[in-house]
Amino acid sequence: MIQVLDKSFEVFITKEELSKEIATLGEQISKDYKDGDLVFLSVLNGAFMFTSDLMKNITIDCEVSFVKMSSYSGVESKGKVDELIGLNGDLSGRDIVIVEDIVDSGLTIDKIISLLETSNAASVKVCTLLYKPDAFTGQKRPDYVGFSIPNAFVVGYGLDYDQKGRNLDMIYQVREQKKPNKDMLNIVLFGPPGAGKGTQSERLRDKYGLVHISTGDVFRALDSESELGKLAKSYSDHGNLVPDEITIKILESEVSKHPEAKGVIYDGFPRTTAQAEALDKFLAAKGTEVSMMLSLVVAEDELKTRLIARAEVSGRKDDADPKIIQNRINTYNNSTAPVADFYKSQGKLSQINGVGTIDDISDRLYSAINSAE
Ligand code: IMP
């Protein structure tokens, strides 16, 4: 995904698809005009890149003029008068192929064709890289079309969004801006082991009426004799991450148990960027999305002290052994911390100071949630 000004775009037509299609167009035009007297009129600005690549695939004699539609205020007439600037010479008796980057409503092409009426050209055809049939309301349909595309805004490979993005080497389509779903509050509560995610999740659950899903708790609650239970335990007992495919499956089945939920606190998930991507897809399919990631920030020494103290109460094997604790913190730093960057790039990350009384930390979380709503 890329950003051009205020909009996000995703790849729509790749470089490979473009060059294959443009080669086909070049071959077709070269065949059709082998006995003609061909002049390309490339319409600036958008068609410059397409024209350049198309010309490399034309194997017959031809000329090219780069033209531009311009309108000026006529001296005698009222309103604007259109003209075509940049023509190299006389077009009479010649075969014209107008080269466009995109035909949308078709108005531009109709205007150009009407301006060429007095040129006495032998023929006038239109070659366009992109064509939006659903938007077309014009007279002259294009004769050569690279790609017929849906009526959505595209950018790149010469096409601009407010003059930006022409330099991109493939075509991108605008990404539908999902309306933020105010009805569902999906919070990813993030932080290293011992940051206080479990304690704070319970408070957020009660305050906002959410469902709390801790993948760690779900793993621990799995029947230790079941296949899945044994598998999950073999990873988590040593402070290692349970593989993504297993975690995602379990998470999805947990979420599906609560179709009526007003929102979910994801505690300990996602732990890798692949899991974050899977969660985005899963929620999008349900018509919702992650509302925010709240990341509890606590220094490493403080985490170790807290975990050792917790082991006394919880009896958790992975809290008692300093080597396993270190491994969990290292795993967090290597695999899990990048997940924060994933949400940061979506503008959804809030860093919360995770040191202080439990009440203080809760208050910080509440105000981050309330200010985002
Ligand atoms: P027309 O509607 O066919 O006259 O197209 C007018 C012009 O609008 C094109 O030459 C492009 O410059 C611009 N245009 C139409 N659709 C798009 C798009 O999806 N991306 C970028 N420019 C576009």
Image: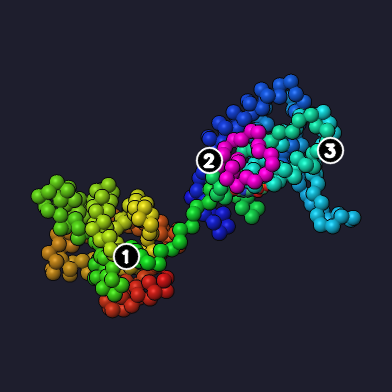
Residue 256 in the figure: left or right of residue 113: left
- Looking at the image, residue 67 lies above or below residue 239: above
Give amino acid for label 3. Thr
Q: Are marks 2 and 3 in contact (CB under 8 Å)?
A: no
Mark 1 / mark 3, whichever is N-terminal: 3
Q: CA distance from mark 2 to mark 1?
A: 36 Å
Asked whether residue 91 is drawn in magenta, I would say no
Dot 1 lies on which element?
strand
In the displayed image of the protein, which residue is found farthest to the top? Answer: 35
The residue at which mark 2 appears reads as: 13
The residue sitting at 63% across, 26% down in the picture is: 28
Asked whether residue 134 is drawn in magenta, I would say yes
Dot 2 lies on which element?
strand
Q: Tell me where the magenta segment starts and ends, as one range.
A: 130-149
Q: For label 2, count other residues whose C-alpha is less than 10 Å away and answer few (under 14), some (14-19) or many (20+).
A: some
The residue sitting at 12% across, 48% down in the picture is: 226
Asked if residue 269 shows in the view, the reply is: yes
The residue at which mark 1 appears reads as: 263
Query: Where does the image place residue 137, in percent across and percent down from the top left?
Result: 65, 46
Q: Main secondary structure of the magenta part?
A: loop
Q: For label 1, count other residues whose C-alpha is less than 10 Å away and answer few (under 14), some (14-19) or many (20+).
A: many
Query: Where does the image place residue 290, in percent across and percent down from the top left?
Result: 37, 61
In the displayed image of the protein, which residue is found farthest to the left? Answer: 225
